[in-house]
Image (spheres, rainbow, N blue to C red):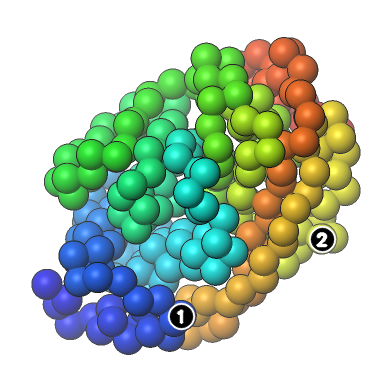
Amino acid sequence: MYDNVDYVNILSRYRLNFEAKVIDKLIEYNRLIIDYPANLTAYKDYARGFEALIIDSIIAVINTMIMTDEVSKIVDIGTGGGIPGIPLAIIFPEKKFYLVDSTAKKTNAVALFCKTLNLENVEVFNERIEDFAHKHRNFFDFGTCRALGRTDITLEYLACMIKNQGLIGLYKGPAYYAQEKKYADKASNMLGLKEDIIYSYRFYEKDEEKTRLYVTFRKIGKTALKYPRKNGVPANEPLAGE
């Protein structure tokens, strides 16, 4: 099952230890997304993909211990090929995951991956995020997204869906402080959010150590009914300005 890639050593590098059946599913998903006929990821090397796709999806969530017993429903918007939703669903099988993307070829692939991996805790939605968000107001305990857009844009999509005291977790690079935090702070004030934990971690890509940030926001107030704005507006007219 492990081919010629030493996945166990990769996991050990990050001090991650899972049951064999969980590791098998993570490895199989890594193979599925890389080998899929349509281009769902730029990674074609299994070892590099496993670190940049799988490890990056789960390490911060595990180490911040934000998946408490109170967290039962999680949304992943702009999921693409299922990142980070599918790796998280594999390691947290007791929780329910809703994976959303507006591109049918991507959600079709994600649905196939979930069927192949026998993930019964995942639902896949081919829908505009703005439309999905208004249908699921105050519905989720936790929301996440990887590489969808600038922080204030992503927060506008997610804020209304999160319950009071729920969390949003976003994957960012070290440039977050210099390039995005001012937009995140402004949008948070408008959306009933407050920046919470920022977790810094490292992973390896092309034998180069990279720093990543996992930035979390807590829902502390109500999000106005007008958010998110109409389809296309959050991305074209960012909430925190240019």
Residue 240 seen from this side:
no
Residue 141 seen from this side:
yes
Mark 1 residue element: loop
Choose between 74 and 115: the one closer to the eye. Answer: 74
Q: Is residue 19 left or right of residue 215?
A: left
Q: Residue at x 33, y 47 (%)?
A: 94
Q: Is disc 1 surrounded by few (<14), some (14 to 19) or many (20+) residues within 10 Å?
A: some
Q: Amino acid at mark 2?
A: Tyr
Name the quadrant of the N terminus. Answer: bottom left
Q: Is disc 2 surrounded by few (<14), some (14 to 19) or many (20+) residues within 10 Å?
A: few
Q: Residue 52 at x, y = what percent?
A: 45, 67
Q: Residue 149 at x, y = what percent?
A: 64, 42
Mark 2 residue element: helix
CA gap between label 1 and label 2 equals 25 Å
Q: In the figure, 153 relative to 206: above or below?
A: above
Q: Is residue 81 left or right of residue 134?
A: left
Q: Is residue 221 left or right of residue 10?
A: right
Disc 1 + disc 2, Cβ < 8 Å: no
Q: Which mark is residue 177?
A: 2
Q: Which mark is residue 175?
A: none
Q: Amino acid at mark 1?
A: Tyr
Choose between 176 and 17: the one closer to the eye. Answer: 17
Q: Which mark is residue 14?
A: 1
Q: Residue at x 46, y 36 (%)?
A: 73
Q: Residue 11 at x, y = what percent?
A: 37, 78
| Tally of numbered discs | 2
